[in-house]
Image (cartoon, rainbow, N blue to C red):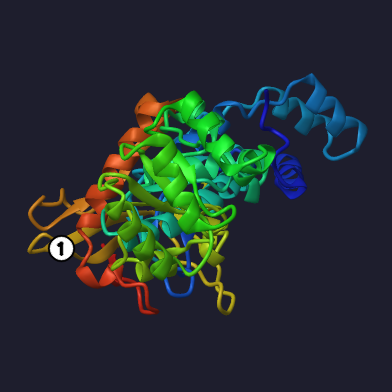
């Protein structure tokens, strides 16, 4: 498998022109950042790093890809020859996956020749823009759930591989499980799922359906009780499975009222340990509205895999510095209205006071002195060194590491960061020269 053509044509035509001009080997620094957070968001969550690194390792031009480029006249023969030998041999740093970020945060920094770094722009952004958007939305849902577990179940509302990516991003953000089996296999995420309404409708009666499910999965299963009449179904579920029934699922109706009624009914039937899970077009706002209801867990679909209204994080990939003929680094930046950038290499620090984050301080060109852990922490970690990827960030182990880091990073935020209402970023971004 190769990811080489998961890119835009202009990446290759730029390289073609740079090879002709003799500038393709000029050492450059590119940076991934967001100019602003999506409306209403107070912080973002970095996700997709492990996926991105894996896809970059597969970024190779084999003969089939080269022949397609050649036959379609995309680039010249000299560039075809260059692409045939392509391997990213530069360096890459980034915020740890699971880290929180703010406007201007340099989430990924790449250093290498112009050609070998510019060619990765589309691939890097396509991964990070989606995964960061999903994780950022999912983190808000986790906060709204106030410790109650959430499961991701939105694969059918995404592309086939987008569903896998969304499941991973939601898990990093604090969801406990996914319905997607490929996400379970690829990334070590716990999977869950029992039956849909079609299983009940398949049978002549609801009782037959419940008995078939309990016979197959045991009384600890979750029975879906809103295909017909909820009250009758709850009564039937306990008669079939007994008071040790694992859970009932409600997928429709006025949830606060419905959940309260079902809880009373279960308790009256002696099923005091049977849990209630809800799965009806939930987002962070409906989850927050259910805080006072006796809900035990949530299943979220459409809203999480679409970023709860913000399906892309708005990240950009910009050249911020290049070497001149003497080898000195020259900061470069766009000056255009509304899209201006800050040139130069960045060294970000998350500053703290009393255990709470107070600012995103970005040092320009000159690294800050090593940060005192009592007052903050440096944010960039090595991802790739001289073309070699640090394996710690990859696979199921890297995904678990990202999930753990997300929990600690969110815990550093000031309390106001967790509010769902509109507001400014939780902490300000400051640029410091020298």
In the image: residue 3, left or right of residue 367: right
In the rendered view of the protein, which quadrant contains the N terminus? top right
In the image: residue 40, left or right of residue 358: right
Where, by quadrant of the figure, is residue 287 drawn? bottom left
The residue at the point 62 percent across, 41 percent down is 205
Where, by quadrant of the figure, is residue 420 drawn? bottom left
The residue at the point 84 percent across, 35 percent down is 76
Question: Toward the viewer: 111 or 376?
Answer: 376
- In the structure shown, which secondary structural element does the residue marked by tag 1 occupy? strand
| Residue 48 appears anywhere in the view | no
Q: Is residue 368 above or below residue 77?
A: below
In the image: residue 296, left or right of residue 51: left
In the image: residue 5, left or right of residue 92: right
| Residue 304 appears anywhere in the view | yes
Q: Position of residue 431 (x, y in %)?
A: 31, 68
Question: Toward the viewer: 399 or 341?
Answer: 399
The tally of labels here is 1
The residue at the point 72 percent across, 45 percent down is 21
Q: Position of residue 279 (x, y in %)?
A: 49, 54
The residue at the point 90 percent across, 38 percent down is 73
Question: Toward the viewer: 89 or 275?
Answer: 275
Q: Position of residue 404 (x, y in %)?
A: 27, 41
Residue position for label 1: 356
Q: Is residue 27 above or below residue 62?
A: below
In the rendered view of the protein, which quadrant contains the C terminus? bottom left
């Amino acid at each position: 498998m190769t990811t080489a053509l998961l890119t835009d044509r202009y990446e290759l035509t730029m390289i073609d022109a740079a090879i002709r001009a003799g500038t393709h080997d000029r050492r450059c620094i590119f940076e991934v950042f967001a100019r602003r957070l999506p409306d209403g968001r107070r912080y973002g969550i970095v996700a997709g790093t492990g996926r991105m690194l894996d896809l970059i390792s597969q970024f190779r031009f084999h003969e089939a890809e080269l022949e397609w480029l050649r036959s379609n006249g995309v680039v010249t023969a000299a560039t075809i020859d260059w692409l045939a030998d392509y391997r990213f041999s530069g360096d890459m740093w980034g915020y740890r996956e699971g880290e929180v970020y703010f406007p201007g945060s340099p989430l990924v920094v790449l250093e290498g020749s112009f050609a070998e770094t510019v060619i990765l722009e589309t691939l890097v952004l396509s991964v990070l823009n989606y995964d960061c958007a999903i994780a950022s939305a999912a983190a808000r849902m986790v906060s709204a759930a106030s410790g109650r577990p959430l499961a991701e179940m939105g694969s059918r509302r995404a592309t086939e591989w987008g569903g896998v990516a969304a499941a991973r991003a939601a898990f990093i953000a604090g969801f406990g499980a996914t319905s997607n089996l490929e996400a379970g296999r690829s990334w070590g995420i716990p999977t869950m799922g029992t039956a849909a309404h079609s299983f009940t409708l398949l049978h002549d009666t609801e009782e037959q359906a419940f008995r078939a499910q309990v016979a197959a999965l045991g009384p600890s299963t979750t029975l879906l009780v809103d295909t017909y009449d909820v009250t009758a179904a709850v009564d039937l579920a306990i008669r079939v499975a007994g008071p040790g029934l694992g859970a009932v699922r409600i997928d429709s109706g006025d949830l606060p009222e419905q959940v309260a009624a079902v809880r009373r009914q279960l308790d009256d039937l002696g099923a005091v340990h049977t849990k209630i899970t809800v799965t009806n077009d939930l987002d962070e706002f409906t989850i927050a509205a259910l805080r006072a209801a006796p809900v035990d867990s949530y299943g979220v679909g459409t809203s999480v895999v679409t970023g709860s209204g913000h399906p892309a994080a708005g990240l950009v990939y910009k050249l911020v510095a290049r070497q001149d003929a003497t080898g000195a680094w020259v900061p470069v930046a766009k000056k255009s209205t509304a899209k201006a950038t800050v040139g130069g290499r960045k060294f970000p620090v998350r500053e703290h006071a009393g255990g709470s984050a107070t600012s995103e301080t970005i040092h320009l060109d000159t690294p800050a002195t090593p940060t005192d852990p009592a007052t903050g922490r440096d944010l960039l970690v090595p991802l790739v060194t001289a073309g070699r990827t640090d394996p710690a960030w990859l696979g199921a182990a890297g995904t678990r590491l990202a999930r753990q880091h997300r929990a600690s990073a969110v815990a550093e935020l000031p309390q106001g960061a967790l509010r769902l209402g509109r507001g400014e970023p939780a902490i300000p971004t400051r640029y410091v020269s020298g």
